[in-house]
Image (cartoon, helix red, strand yellow):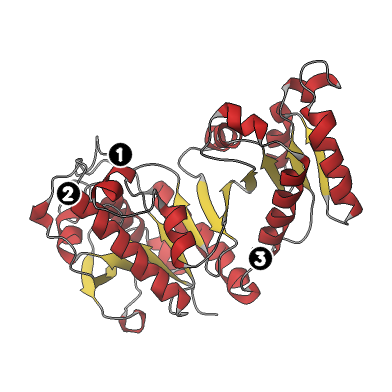
Amino acid sequence: MARPLIAIPMGDPAGVGPEIVLGALGDKALHESARMLVAGDAGVLERALNYPNAPALMLRLVASAGEGDYQPGIVNAIDLKQIASGDFVPGRVDGRCGQAAYTYIKKAIQLALAGEADAIATPPINKESLRAGGIPYIGHTEIFAALTRTPDPLTLFEVRGMRVFFLSRHVSLRQACDLVKKDRVMDYARRSWAVLRQLGVREGVMAVAGLNPHCGENGLFGDEEVRELAPAVKALQAEGLQVAGPIGADSVFAQALEGKYNSVLSLYHDQGHIAAKTVDFMRTVSITAGMPILRTSVDHGTAFDIAGKGVASPLSMAEAVRVAVKYAPYYRNEGKV
């Protein structure tokens, strides 16, 4: 079976994206399972190859995926000629870099939609740079949603086999609590199970996390579990979905890590983020699913404070590629949720 081809947009040129992408490509073991194609700028990649601690790699410019030589030591890249290496300063917000990062992502999506790439693994981009460059999207998820015409893609984390879905993400904690409603929980649980099937996961039980300490102790301190969560779980079970809960958030993630549950529906951003990143910050991978294509990503930012210094760890980028490789065959066969 051919190694899956993973398209990798280069990320914000002024951030750590170029160097962690090259660091991942310098991982010889990664080449045993993946073919990797970078969408970016040749000059920026050449500059990053001269950073301290950069791997010894040869840049090979190609016009299409079919022209690549996917062997260790080679960086196959499509040169999109968006920005010259001398046109920006590493570590600074720059609208031109935001525009370039968007163009790299757009090219990677085109490759995946055309079937030339089996999945996409993304390094970080910078929200301020996107805005400064006039890009009308706040981040990766919104870009992928728009360019794949997916109204509401789902985000999940994976780390050491533990999968975490999110009932809400970038809203205030007050708003997140207000969103814990029976109908919303049922909708997200159904969609999360559809994503699991899209990833090839068909066995096991999904756990719904509790909101209050000890799940509210039957309403003694918070009644969301009694009023919203338990009825949602009961109704989902009646539909035939393998769902359990609500289960106290102080224990459910540890149980999922041990394999008791195939995933956890976290009720708000930090509940799931803290759990996953405490397990292993660098190996926590974000997956955007429910789209016609699969996207995995590092779960850290552009790290402007260390960009260009050659000290950024490529571990998370390499892990994002590994997770993309893991799920790409299933995702390609299943198609859109």
Q: Residues within 10 Å of mark 1 (few under 14, many from 20)?
A: some
Comparing 95 with 2, the one in front is: 95
- Which residue type does callout 1 highlight? Ala
The span from disc 1 to disc 3 (Cα, nearest Å) is 32 Å
Of marks 2 and 3, which one's residue comes earlier in the chain? 2
Answer whether residue 256 is visible to the viewer in this image: yes
Q: Nearer the viewer, mark 2 or mark 1?
A: 1
User: What residue is shown with label 3?
Assistant: 198
Dot 3 crowding, Cα within 10 Å, few <14, some 14–19, many 20+: many
Residue at the disc numbered 2:
51
In the image, what residue occupies the spot 23% across and 63% down?
A: 57
Rendering coords of residue 170 (x, y %): 51, 39
Q: Position of residue 73 (x, y in %)?
A: 28, 67
What's the residue at 63%, 70% (across, down)? 330
Mark 2 or mark 1, earlier in chain? 2
Q: Residue at x 74, y 31 (%)?
A: 210
Q: x, y (%) of residue 66? A: 36, 84
Under circle 1, the secondary element is loop
* Gap in angstroms between the C-alphas marked 2 and 1: 16 Å
Compared across the picture, whether 233 is left or right of 278 comes to right
Q: Which amino acid is tagged 2?
A: Tyr
Residue 72 visible? The answer is no
Mark found first going from the N terminus, 1 or 3: 3
Find disc 1 in the rendering and name its residue.
303
For the view shown, which residue lies furthest in the right direction?
238
Q: Nearer the viewer, residue 198 or 21?
A: 198
Mark 3: amino acid? Gln
